[in-house]
Structures are given as structure tokens and as C-alpha cells.
Amino acid sequence: MKIKLINPNTTWSMTDKIGACARAVARPGTQVVAVSPAMGPVSIESHYDEALAAPGLLQEIAVGERDGCDGYVIACFGDPGLKAARELARGPVLGIAEAAMHVASLIGSAFSVVTTLERTIGQAWHLAEAYGMKRFCANVRACELPVLDLERPGSDARTRITDECRRALAEDGSDVIVLGCAGMTDLCEHIAGTLGVPVVDGVAAATTMVEALVALRLSTSKQGELARPLPKAMVGMLKGFTLHDVPASLHQAA
Ligand code: 2AL
């Protein structure tokens, strides 16, 4: 099967790292294609960034549909554009926050999310609420670490994130850690080994869950809310996003 993993930010060093971590957990027969959109913010750490990441992300979903991708992972913890991506895709589309929170709820009694900047805490709570995961979410904490510091050679990101995870376990009453940024994916093993609790990386969780859904022959429901958006003209800079009618055969469940 072919899974397209989209890092909605445009920092390719992070995309390559995320792709490698996804491939490390994927089954032997799974091809993971990791991409960043051709346009958009270099990191996503505000609602503004999320909104401007969505067009490029949707372009990648449209290309993936043309290329026959079986499923998609949106590898940013704000899950930007998730519902719109589901409208465009036939196969399953998972966001890493959604996948990580669900997985965490299955292996502990309460999880703490450890994110980057404090300003991203609100969105993580919003998603926990939207996904029905709030009752499992003991706390959302930040390290005050800009996303691109995760890519900077010599940064103290690993130590700072590990320390915050340790504080979370001591203070929140949680027993599972959820990493709040796709760029933390390569730190998961170290943090889990250091702290001795399950640490959920959404990149790995979403990749293996998409694999499972595809193996189950389950696709995104095209009845109702997540049906393909109506054919419609877009104007100005979004002209290329105009949706034309497509043959119904393309939208039937696999
Ligand atoms: C993220 C993420 O996963 N990728 C990105 O650019 N920003 N999340 C975050 N909490 O900062």
C-alpha cells in the first residue's frame, strides 16, 4: 500500500526526518511517501500558520488522489485541514494529534501533551475536546521551544522536552506522554527509555493506524459531511483550486 505522509510545514529537513520515523514502524509492504507542500509556512505554531498551511496541504491530497495513494497522514499536531482533506480523499486521512490521543487513551488512564510554544496549548485542548479525548487529557504543557529549534544542530531541545515530560508525570497525575509536535518524532524512544512510561508519537501512531484501516479495507465515508466538495470556481490566487466535476466511479469506496 502507498501512504502519503504530509508535513504541512515547508521545512524539508523535518519532512525527511518524519518520513524516516514513519518508515521505521511501517510494514515491509508499505510505501511511505513523505512530502511538504510547495507553499506555506516553514513551521506551524499559530492559527494563522495553520490556515495558510491548508491550501498547500490540500494540493498534496489532490495530487495523492491522482497518484493512487491508499491513505494519508497529516503530520502536524494542530491537525490542520483534516476535515477538508477527508472530503478530497477516498482513503483514510488521520491527523497526528487525533491518532496520538486515541492511542494514548487505550494504554493509560490519563495523558499529558507536551507541545512546543505555549501559544499552541489552546489548539491542543480544542482538539482534545473535539475528539472526545478531553476526559483522558490530564494537561497540555509547553517547553517554550520554537518548532524550528527541533531542527537546529546543537539545540537543547531533547533535554528540555524530556524535562517537561518528567514534570508532567510528577505534577499532572498522568501515566502516558503524548508528544505535541511532529518534529519530536525522533525523540520518542529516548524519552520513553528515560522516563519508563509509554510515550506516544503521533507520526508513528497515525502511520500504523492508516495502515490498519487500509488493511481493513475501510475508507473515508463519502455519504454526507465528508462527501467530495461541490464543483465550484475559486478565484484570485486560489484559481487552481477550482473543483471540476469528476466521474462518480472515482469516488466510490475502494
Ligand atoms: C507543530 C507540528 O507538529 N509541526 C509544526 O510545524 N508545528 N506543532 C506544534 N505544536 O508546534
Image: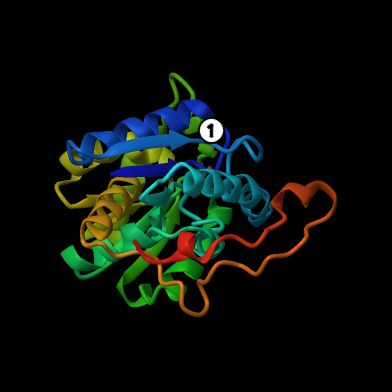
Q: Nearer the viewer, residue 94 or 142?
A: 94
Q: Nearer the viewer, residue 246 or 154?
A: 246
- Check disc 1: other Cα within 10 Å, few if <14, some if 14-19, many if 20+: some
Q: Nearer the viewer, residue 53 or 189?
A: 53
Task: Identify which amino acid the numbered label 1 is placed on.
Answer: Leu
Locate residue 38, reporting x and y percent: 62, 34
In the rendered image, the residue lying farthest to the right is 236
Mark yes or no: residue 115 visible: yes
Locate residue 241, reporting x and y percent: 70, 52
Q: Which residue is mark 1?
A: 148
- Quadrant where the N terminus sits is top left
Q: Residue at x 66, y 37 (%)?
A: 39
Q: Is residue 159 above or below residue 76?
A: above
Q: Residue at x 45, y 19 (%)?
A: 153
Q: Secondary structure at mark 1?
A: helix
Locate residue 149, reporting x and y percent: 50, 31
